[in-house]
Amino acid sequence: MEITESFVKNILKEDYPSDYQQLYNKSPMLQYLDKKMKAVHGNSKTRRSLANIYAIYSILYFYKDDYYEQKSKYRSFEGYDYTRLFNFYRTLYGGRKLQNHALNSRINGEFHNKVKNTINDLIITNNGKYLIHIDYIYVNKHDISKTACRIIEKYMELLIAKDHSLISILNTLQNLTDYSQKRATINSLLDEDAEARIFEIISYAILKNHYKNIHVYFGYSRKSIKELPLELYKTGRTNANDGGIDFVMRPVGRFFQVTEVDNYDKYLLDIDKVMHFPISFVIKTKQNRAKILRNLKQYITIRSSGMAVLEERYKKAIEEIITINELQTWIQELNNHDIDEIIRDIDIYYKLEMNMNDENE
């Protein structure tokens, strides 16, 4: 059985040099953690899964001090109090906004789904108390709790380094005086392999500063008509349950959804979520937007099975397709002040997204 993440393999080799692979093969908990840590890669499209990972870590953190290699004593243990665990994992990196779902139920279902042929739940619930099943702590007579903790701690360390790499780039950008270099660097961040959250934040910053230079005329009567700039607002964090709306515009009332080109079903789902209100799709691709629009309309035709009412409903809900190509073009059209505003907005919203202004992190 292949160990996916190199840092997991390295830690196992350090702790169990002669039988690390056999131990991994027999450890459902280590296999589960290994599968859940793909977010350390720069082009990862997966979620960080901090809630589930931290639920495991919070239990093992206290366990290794209280019951390490004390199998008989642990068998009589009734579990750690929920409040103690919850308060602890919210002090961890990225944990301040986490909810209690992982401790309550979510992790066991996913554990059985990701690691086949597991009989017992990973986390035992006991009237508001929680503990790891002993079968997953002992492997080949080894207590692997400290190794599992080391793996999770390394995962946190790698995430911190990854998260702060963009901050380093932004700091460099802010100190540059050559605006052609600033534009080129922002362009380079708009990559098809960019992490989804980073792409959403950068695309928002570009769109916000692009649209603010476009003016419209609004008023309830001819005498009250005013010239107003278009204003783009971000609805919340990138993983928020926002009903399919990532950005909204005033005063014209446009919806924007950031997505990827590989799943047209998601486009239709986003349209359904807002009751077929027109959406502009901001897509992480360098494909030509005319081609994407053509393919999306063809997909709608197939999905509607020739039913005109459905085909018309979805096609009318596509307001505009915006790709990396358009974003990069607009970067070149913006003046130097707007470029600095883009850098400032990316910095603000990225730090907000990553909770980098929180004292606990």
Image: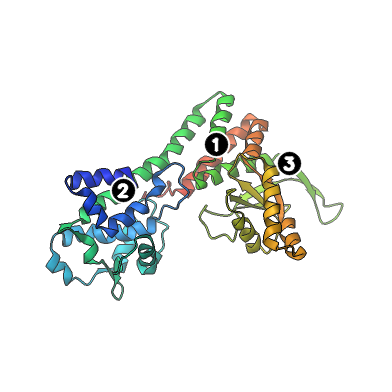
Residue 3: image tag: 2
Q: State left or right for residue 98 relative to residue 67.
A: right
Q: Earlier in the sequence, mark 2 or mark 1?
A: 2
- Measuring 82% from the left and 57% from the top, which residue is drawn there? 220
Give amino acid for label 3.
Ile
Give amino acid for label 1.
Ile
Q: Is residue 208 above or below residue 179?
A: below
Task: For label 2, count other residues whose C-alpha is less than 10 Å away and answer few (under 14), some (14-19) or many (20+).
Answer: some
Give the distance between the C-alpha atoms of the residues marked 2 and 1, in whole angstroms. Answer: 39 Å
Q: State left or right for residue 288 relative to residue 117.
A: right
Question: Horizontal and vertical percent for residue 22?
Answer: 22, 52
- Measuring 65% from the left and 50% from the top, which residue is drawn there? 281
Instruction: Name the mark nearer the viewer: 2 or 1.
Output: 2
Q: Is residue 64 above or below residue 105?
A: above
Instruction: Name the mark nearer the viewer: 2 or 3.
Output: 2
Question: Horizontal and vertical percent for residue 339?
Answer: 60, 33
Give amino acid for label 2.
Ile
Q: Secondary structure at mark 1?
A: helix
Q: State left or right for residue 90 relative to residue 10.
A: right
Residue 343: image tag: 1
Residue 214: image tag: 3
Task: For label 3, count other residues whose C-alpha is less than 10 Å away and answer few (under 14), some (14-19) or many (20+).
Answer: few
